[in-house]
Amino acid sequence: MRFRLVLVVAVLALLGSACSRDADELLTNASTPVREAVVHDPLSLGEISESGATESARAFLNSRAATSGARQPPTSPIARLTSFATFERWSVDGFALGDATGTVPGDTPIWAVQYEGAWRPDGRPVTLRFAVVAIDAHTGSVVSAAAFQGAMIWPKRAGLKQPSTCVSFAPAEVRVSVGPAQAIERVRAAIPGGALSPIQTPWAPDRADAVALRCVVESTAGLMFQYGWMVSVPSEISLRDCTTLTVRQVEIKRRCWAAVAVYFVEGVTGAVTRTDEIVFTGPLLTDAQAAIVDEAAVALGWWDVWARLKANDDSIVPLHIIDSLTAAADSARSGQ
């Protein structure tokens, strides 16, 4: 028996042929009739909604604005359900914010809510462009929070499309035995060592995120519900020449920030299928301007450069912005 998930970009076979007994077992566990979805021993992913977690995180960051060295209000929230162990792994590279730093068991489901902004705590030589607040998915309390120079979750989502037969689901309604952190680990294991993105940048599985989906799949028995995770894995950020070969001789060239590979992880079996790949377009720059940007990134970090240039994605960068970027890099090098 074979199940198929119908995607925007392709029809993907999720389960291979199996003998009748094995197939019936998969049918019972992995996909059920649309009228009912039954998963044995489903995970408890918490009762707190994404919007509730987002507002709690915003309130926490605003209440700690002065002590955290906030330079502007937090914007553009993204919330992803994961485990506290994931946040702990991230926080090694972060700067703790406020007095909420705590701990819960590593397998506790949390909402990792990321905001964009500018934080400059005392003693930090560079601007921290992102803050992530860990919200307990069961209680809604703030467990911990940290600011980072780079994004833990890729902030630009406009190019990603979930399959046309799938809808996003609230965690309390998802019927799976494979959680978001497990789904990400399965995707990590599926990425070949040393694999590069289409713009020749390394993949960054530590910044992968998972969105809960319920999909309609087809089988010989008819339409079925299937729960799973859409896992997005970005590549490391930089600005690479991604001009097509036919126009590569022009002086102003298209640059790209990163690529994102998208996977579907079935929520019971954990089967992994790669479904899409998107490249995020950056600004149009001459080679001389690109060299200036590369030099500024050494002093400021790529995410600070991204924050300063993102408004000019897919367009020519005005000279005054290039000049201001150079000035900011000079200031950072001088320690001001």
Image (cartoon, rainbow, N blue to C red):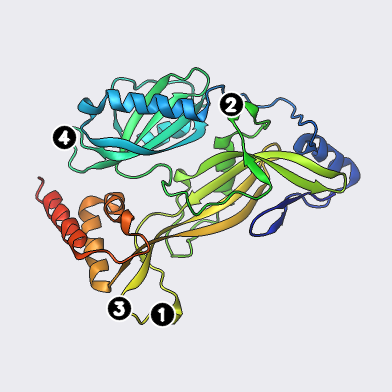
Mark 2 belongs to which amino acid?
A: Leu
Q: Quadrant of residue 43?
A: top right
Residue beneath the point at 20% across and 43% down: 126
Q: Quadrant of residue 244?
A: bottom left
> On the image, numbered disc 1 is attached to which residue?
247
> On the image, numbered disc 4 is attached to which residue?
123
Residue beneath the point at 61% across and 26% down: 172
Give the number of the mark in front: 4 or 3: 3
The image position of residue 165, as x and y in percent, is 69, 47
Mark 3 belongs to which amino acid?
A: Glu
N-terminal label among 4 and 3:
4
Q: CA distance from mark 2 to mark 4?
A: 38 Å
Q: Is residue 253 above or below residue 29?
A: below
Q: CA distance from mark 2 to mark 3?
A: 52 Å
N-terminal label among 1 and 2:
2
Nearest the eye: 264 or 247: 247
Q: Left of 260 or right of it: where is 335?
A: left
Q: CA distance from mark 4 to mark 3?
A: 42 Å
> On the image, numbered disc 2 is attached to which residue?
45
Residue beneath the point at 59% across and 29% down: 171
Nearest the eye: 246 or 153: 246
Q: Left of 146 or right of it: where is 213?
A: right
N-terminal label among 2 and 3:
2
Which element type, helix, strand or loop, lies under badge 3? loop
> On the image, numbered disc 3 is attached to which residue?
251
Which element type, helix, strand or loop, lies under badge 4? loop
Nearest the eye: 22 or 64: 64
Q: Is residue 218 above or below residue 70?
A: below
Report crowding for label 2: few under 14, some 14 to 19, many 20 or more residues within 10 A (C-alpha).
many
